[in-house]
Amino acid sequence: MTMPQLSDARAALTHEVEVLDERGRRSTIFIPAERPLTVYVDKRELVTLMTLGGAPEALTLGYLRNQRLVKSIADIVSVQVDWSVDAVAVVTRGGIADVEARTSKKVVTTGCGQGSVFGGLMDDIDQIVLPPDARIAQSTVYRIVDTIRTQQSIYKQAGSVHGCALFSNAGELLYFVEDVGRHNAVDAIAGRMWLDGVAGSDKVFYTTGRLTSEMVIKGAQMGIPFLLSRSGTTQMGHMVAGRIGMALLARCTGKHFLLLTGHARLDFEPLPP
């Protein structure tokens, strides 16, 4: 398979600012960077993403994948990011079929930074089949939560960002991405999976943000049967996960979690005294 040509755009992930505290004392702190990235596909402006800028090429690929605009990474010739104009140029081999009709309906989601998706949220959801026998051990859930707790991150330095991670079924960290919105972080991981040819059928996805319908649908499109979060879920996120048989674990902190859907996918183990 021919892989796309990618730029390797770099940008500062934090910005230093001067502040005054409640006593009028001056100091400097770091805050997350945020910048626009306008996506052009075959010279047609598609969307502007507000992003931290840590993985812009992967973000662009994952966005096109999760929006169901491009079916295969082999259909993409190149992805070139230019921060001097805050834009990324994507060249495809055959264009996007019916692009006007497919991008005419936009749904504003609950994603941080105001995410959006094209088309109906539930389009094709019933065609997604997750591996029926995929299971996860309770001890693996704890290993994942502990790995995230000790992970070096922009959040610990500057706050105000969301993190997403992909783990193996044994709890090994494969990818970790932070961005100003969790929808961007999940798209960046989807793009990296696409580039590396990584399947989601035996993987576990973790997010610091809440499990909305958008997050559940994107996880399902990536073929991932397990979604974990230190936050909660929404009614629609819960409904979609139950409908497709995904294991949804919320409020994952320390040894605590709430398994909301996909009960048969979790192998409970005796807790230590």
Image: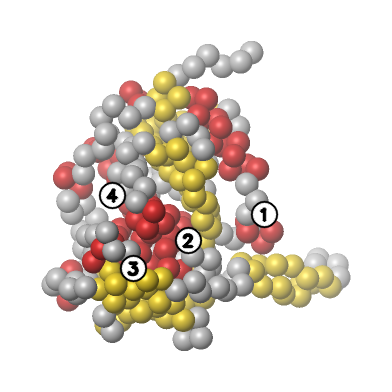
Please state which amino acid type lies under the numbered disc 2.
Answer: Gly
Asked whether residue 117 appears in the rendered view, the answer is no
Distance from label 1 to label 4 (Cα)? Answer: 30 Å
- Looking at the rendered image, the disc whose residue lies closer to the viewer, 3 or 2, is 3
Residue 235: % across, % down:
34, 43
Please state which amino acid type lies under the numbered disc 1.
Answer: Lys
Please state which amino acid type lies under the numbered disc 4.
Answer: Gln
Residue 1: % across, % down:
27, 59
Above or below for 230 versus 118: above
Distance from label 3 to label 2 (Cα)? Answer: 26 Å
Is mark 1 in CB contact (under 8 Å) with mark 4? Answer: no
- Looking at the rendered image, the disc whose residue lies closer to the viewer, 1 or 4, is 4
Q: Which residue is mark 3?
A: 4
Query: In the image, 94: left or right of 179?
Result: left
Q: Secondary structure at mark 1?
A: helix
- Looking at the rendered image, the disc whose residue lies closer to the viewer, 4 or 3, is 3
Q: Secondary structure at mark 4?
A: helix
Q: Secondary structure at mark 3?
A: loop
